[in-house]
Amino acid sequence: MKILVVEDERKVGKFVENALGEQAYTVKHVTTCAAARDALAEAPYDAVVLDLGLPDGDGLELLREWRQAGFNEPVLILSARDAVEDRIRGLNLGADDYLPKPFSVDELVARVRSLLRRQTTGQRATVLEHRGVRLDLLSRVAERDGRPVELTTREFALLELFLQNPRRVLTRTLIAEKVWDASYDLETNLIDVYVRRLRQKFERPGGAPFIKTIRGTGYQLA
Ligand code: CA
């Protein structure tokens, strides 16, 4: 599990980093909005701990951008601003939890753990649908326009990733990490081969594309 910690007070950031690191989470600590944007564009994270007052901007703006871009992993806001309006604004923008400073590190760890647990035990939909394509995650059945489509395990996992992130551009790195594993060789074109197979299986003849190629970056559900 990888966690991004965005906190400009170095001492607090280090403290959080160490506490989460002791729980065997992999932590990346950044201190600015710019570095947080870069980190999230470069690699997938399972959760974000986000301070609001950052030297080059507002954490709430970052949160808004991420949610608009389809980043739907849990975000825990960490801030000295414990005013009710800030808390409500943050939750409205899609934060999953809010911890006012000063906080106890045990509480932080407990909340992060609970967010990740919620994430993995699924408050998530068990049926995903997009433009006539339907994926039932429990029965493992895929359909197009009501007709079953045969998928291999890997094809199913790739389609699930697209349908879970309908508005997000999925980079090759992210697809490799989520669908294959760390040993995936980015020099091969295996991802492209699998995307082509999904297109063949789900695009209607002569119809609109199902998955768009974002040149130089990756793929996005159309
Ligand atoms: Ca701050």
Image: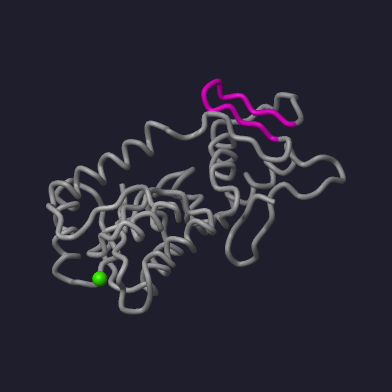
Give the image location of residue 71, x and y in percent: 48, 54
**For the point 77% across and 42% down, which residue is it?**
203
Q: Which residues are magenta?
A: 133-144
Image quarter for ligand 1 equals: bottom left
**For the point 56% across and 38% down, which residue is it?**
160
- Left or right of residue 86: residue 18: left
Viewer-closest of 71 and 68: 68
The secondary structure that dominates the magenta segment is strand
Viewer-closest of 104 and 46: 104
Q: Which of the 4 image quarters holds residue 11?
A: bottom left
Viewer-closest of 198 and 136: 136
**For the point 44% across and 53% down, which residue is it?**
92
Residue situated furthest top in the rendering: 139
Give the image location of residue 64, x and y in percent: 47, 61
Q: Residue 130: within the magenta?
A: no
Residue situated furthest bottom in the rendering: 56
**For the point 37% across and 31% down, which residue is it?**
121
**Image vertical order of residue 182 relative to residue 81, above or below:** above
The figure's colour scheme reads one colour
